[in-house]
Image: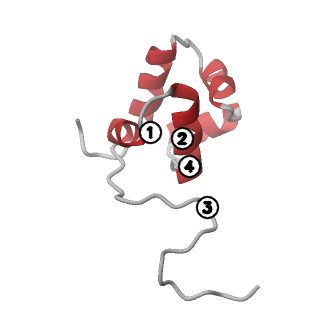
Amino acid sequence: MDATYDPNRLLAALARELKITTDKKLAKTLGFSAGIIAGLRAGRLALTATMYLQIQEKSGLPLPALQALSGDRRRRLRPSGSAAPGAPRTER
């Protein structure tokens, strides 16, 4: 598998696996807006931990397989808004 990060590979594989022909249908199936899919394809957005979990839930594919398909080499994924263990807390 190519090690370069490219969410398009993941989206294409999901469309094939789920037998979906358009990005609009893919977005609806995954529970995303069409704008999210367009942003991922254009490189304006990156896949987040929350997105991976939602894709995993809808597709049934394991998280490591999803990461491999997209070229994501992060060892740990954290949901948006969560800090790394040991990171200083900021008061709001």
Mark 4 residue element: loop
- Measure the C-alpha gap from mark 4 to mark 3: 13 Å
Q: Amino acid at mark 1?
A: Pro
Q: What residue sits right under mark 2 in the picture? A: 40
* Within-10-Å neighbours for mark 3: few <14, some 14–19, many 20+: few
Q: Amino acid at mark 4?
A: Leu
**Taking 30 as reference, is 84 above or below it?**
below
Q: What residue sits right under mark 4 in the picture? A: 45
- Measure the C-alpha gap from mark 4 to mark 2: 5 Å
| Percent coordinates x, y for residue 43 in the rendering | 50, 45
* Within-10-Å neighbours for mark 2: few <14, some 14–19, many 20+: some
The residue under the point 51% across, 47% down is 47
Q: What residue sits right under mark 3 in the picture? A: 80
* Within-10-Å neighbours for mark 4: few <14, some 14–19, many 20+: some
- Measure the C-alpha gap from mark 2 to mark 1: 6 Å
- Measure the C-alpha gap from mark 2 to mark 3: 17 Å
Mark 2 residue element: helix
1 or 3: mark nearer the eye: 3
- Measure the C-alpha gap from mark 4 to mark 1: 9 Å
Give the image quarter of residue 32.
top right
Residue 2 located left or right of residue 49 = left
| Percent coordinates x, y for residue 86 in the rendering | 47, 84
Mark 1 residue element: helix
